[in-house]
Amino acid sequence: MGQPTLSRQLGLIGLIATGVCSMLGASINVVPFMIQRHVPGIGPYVLPAFIFAAIPALFAALAYSSLATAMPRAGGSYIYASRGLNPYLGFVASFSQWFGLSIVIGVVAYVTIPFLRDVAFALSLPEMAHSLDTGIVRVGLALLLVWLFVWINIRGAKSYEKTIIPLMILMFLMGGIVIFAGFSFSQEDFAEVILNKESRVLDILPKPEFHLPTFLSASALLFASFIGFDSIAQAGGEAKNPTQRLPLAIGLTILLVGAYYMLFTSAVYNAIPWSFVAEEAMQKDITAPGLLGYLLPDYLTVLIVGGAAIALINDLPAMLLSVSRLMFAWAEDGIFPKKITKIHPGFHTPYVAIISSGIMSSVGIIGSHFAGDFFLGIDIMVTSMMVNFLLMCITLVCIGKANPLMAKEIKILKNSFIRNLIGILGSIVLLFFLVIHTWKDITTEVGVWYFHSTPIWLIVMAIASIIFYIKIKRMKSQGIDTRLLFKKLP
């Protein structure tokens, strides 16, 4: 009997759910509001910054959609860059992506617990709410969430879809309450409620002067909200009819999530003055449901907090799928230990890769706790994904020369002129965003150097480079034609 292999069981809805659930969560319930702390002065310009952040994501989505039609394999971005550009660049970029996303899985699990705290407050359980803010409880529950979804991922595509699709539907339904409530109240209503409940006089301030550097910094950070479609590409080895369904799932996910982002963020800032959001963000971790809870009866607050918790939890299985398939693809090429390619005989999943990703995500939970600011993990991910998306656009330009046989397999953007134009424009925009994000990181004052994401990312890239060169040297000594290896699909 032959060795078990990955099986193509993920349908279109499962792929869309993977992308949607990777993009929504912290991206919509936390980041658009906590950004007031991380980018002071953005004030009322969060929504325009969100829209601007979508531009590089659209270029990257076109690059992914095009490359996915030619190389529908597990490992997505790694396969695209290693076959269509350069194997070294493909590995180091995807390694930093794996590191960034693995850390963010831990970050998401960690920031889920404040939502449970808000539920406890809404249910008039202050002692439970305060206990959820203690370190040992918050870290313990976050670890439990990660390893629950490690188990679900190991159980295979059917178990994964049965979990993620219903949760996605619940997330949208409960998020709809936020949108309806946000547009049903005015900022004057909120000021009156704050006066009655807390005896606070809330001044509704006029818009401050627009500050371009602050706006660009916020856009670079909000770019992280649009990266989830990458997880669809990572599932290329398990998608049904991948040549058609992968690009379709990426396109539908971008449209669906983009519209939801705009409605959700607009609704919250319509009802809650930006000045109040900024003030609260400086004092504690805040969430959209926690802000709207001032205006809503307790039962609706519980519902929207539950929806936010589901949105965050949904991030975990989708991103675990993504990072584990990267490891699987590296191991297939011989860059990582072959034991990582082990596939469960019953569930047909790369269980060793999934468990390894769970371990790395657990490190992210502990790191978030000791760093004291989960945005460090977000920053690392943003840097990693900007570099990764930049390479995807460059691959779109270079694949015709680097691997002409593979380029002929492309079904979307078949015209080389259009493909090159999109790749060049995408590269320029993404490089611009990367420079802005890096400049903000290195110029921000922090307590110690390792609270900067840029040096951490550079260290990760150095580690990846060492791993790659050691493995390639060993493969060549064994007589393996590495040039041929990276010209064909695994």
Image (spheres, rainbow, N blue to C red):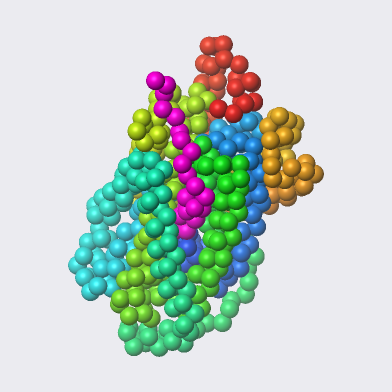
Residue placed most toward the observer, 466 or 57: 57
Q: Which residues are magenta?
A: 1-25
Q: Residue at x 53, y 66 (%)?
A: 260
> Residue at horizontal 41%, vertical 23%?
3
In the current view of this chain or complex, which residue is farthest to the left?
127
The quadrant of the image that shows the N terminus is top left
Image point 41% across, 43% down: which residue? 157
Percent position of residue 100, x then y: 48, 44
Q: Position of residue 400 (x, y in %)?
A: 74, 34
**Residue 433 visible in the displayed image:** no
Residue 418 x, y percent position in the rendering: 77, 47
Q: Is residue 422 above or below residue 360?
A: below
Q: Quick one: 375 or 52, which is closer to the camera? A: 52
Against 304, residue 256 (above or below) is: above
> As displayed, is residue 296 above or below residue 378?
below
Residue at 40% across, 75% down = 292
Residue 218 image-quadrant placement: bottom right
Left or right of residue 201: residue 140: left
Apparent side of residue 373 relative to residue 435 in the rendered image (left or right): left
State the image coordinates of residue 459 (x, y, percent, origin top left): 50, 36
Image quadrant assignment for residue 46: bottom right
Specify whether 148 is left or right of 472.
left
Q: Quadrant of the C terminus?
A: top right
* 20 part of magenta stretch: yes
Above or below for 159 versus 84: below
Kindly give the residue lying farthest to the right in the view shown.
417
Residue 291 visible in the snapshot = yes
Q: Does residue 116 belong to the magenta stretch?
A: no
